[in-house]
Amino acid sequence: MPRTRLIVIATLLLVLLLGTIALDNLILGANLIPELNLPDSAQTFVTIFLGVFIEAAAFLLIGSLASGFVAVYVSNDDIARMIPRNPILATCVGALIGMIFPVCECGVVPLVRRLYQKGLPISAGFAFLLGAPVLNPVVIASTYAAYGNSTILWARLGFTFIIAVGVGLIFLSQPDPRKILLRPDLFPHLISPSTISVSETATFKSEHAVHDQAHDHGHDHGTNSGLQRALTIAADEFFDMGRYMIFGTLLSTSLQLFVPQSTLLSIGTNPVLSVVAMQALAFVLSVCSTVDAFLSLNFINTFTTGSVIAFLVFGPMIDIKSTMMFLGVYQRRVVIYLAALLTLSGLVVGLLMT
């Protein structure tokens, strides 16, 4: 069993143990395990942590299952046929593909790479990359569960669509994909054949054949084997993202309890610093978009509403882990430009909604 999975399982067992202790003290009102009594501050920490963790874990599981079934039963060709030929319409549709195929910011990067190989326009790829982690049923449901039919819900969806399409249209002005993609020879449908050398073409065919053999999940003829593969992929994604969720929950709970409220208030009530701080937090935490709405609840009474919206819009678009994945598809200067563009966009959104 991989070391990461062992760590996550051990952490989950610890959470269950602490949860039992918390329920013993807070619900039953009796000390069934008196030798394990926790101090008041620790009990409060466990209570807040479990409140966020239990709700978030359910949506993470749903998102992982959806990603597993999409990976096995939906081919990239099926997705590519949905894209209009008009580049502007393709960009708008790209931002909304997540409504049909829910993927988080981790699963969307390799899928975009595959869609580029099928001829997906560059602009639609960027729109899908930035929009899908929020504009999908799982994230919409989790945000609604956290905030209800509120301004925060609709602002998150609206600004995510606007930024995703806007960034896609910006890259539409660059007609040469060779100046954007890290390995143009891997995307022959986007690059003119005359610009690719014979050796590069041979390299593409070899790598593409190996990649298809290893990862072609779209034509699984065995129902049982397909279901097993889907569940395996879902389990791997759940355990992989579970560590980020646990770390993010621990950090947000720690900030809520142990950072002096005066410090949080001095930052959180400042209309500019609060937005910058929440954007930085979203980038560092790298929390999956299926659970970030629950994490942001810890800051709703301390930081401005605009900063919370910036957290929910900016975080799913780019964070530490997704930035590393972007570097496997796009050139470094493009990733830097994209990060700066998204940071400024998130700042503007936060200031507008403050």
Image (cartoon, rainbow, N blue to C red):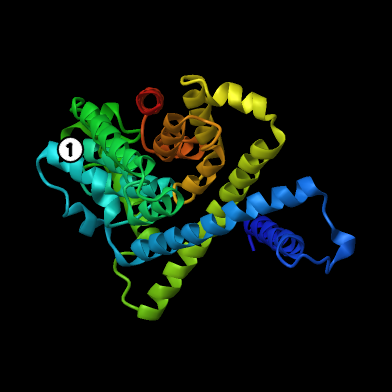
Instruction: Look at 38% across and 55% down and name the residue there.
Output: 141
**In this picture, is 225 found above or below 88?**
below
**In this picture, is 331 found above or below 34?**
above
Q: Residues within 10 Å of mark 1 (few under 14, many from 20)?
A: few
- Is residue 327 at all visible to an observer of this figure? no
Q: Which residue lies furthest to the right in this view?
A: 35
Task: State which quarter of the image contains the N terminus.
Answer: bottom right
Look at mark 1 in the image and give the residue it sits on: 193
Instruction: Look at 49% across and 24% down and name the residue there.
Output: 276
x and y percent of residue 48 in the render? 64, 50
Left or right of residue 1: residue 153: left
* Front one among 114 and 337: 337
x and y percent of residue 159 in the render? 30, 35
Given the image, on which type of amino acid does mark 1 rest?
Answer: Pro
Left or right of residue 281: residue 149: left
Instruction: Look at 47% across and 46% down and name the residue there.
Output: 293
**In this picture, is 210 found above or below 267?**
below
**In this picture, is 58 found above or below 272?**
below
Q: Residue furthest left?
A: 86
Considering the numbered disc 1 on the image, is that residue within a helix, a strand or a loop?
helix
Q: In which quarter of the image is residue 221?
A: bottom left
x and y percent of residue 216 in the render? 34, 62
Task: State which quarter of the image contains the C terminus.
Answer: top left
* Front one among 293 and 331: 293
Q: In which quarter of the image is residue 127?
A: top left
Left or right of residue 252: residue 347: left
- Is residue 180 at all visible to an observer of this figure? yes
* Front one among 235 and 263: 263
Q: How many labels does the image show?
A: 1
x and y percent of residue 291 in the render? 49, 50
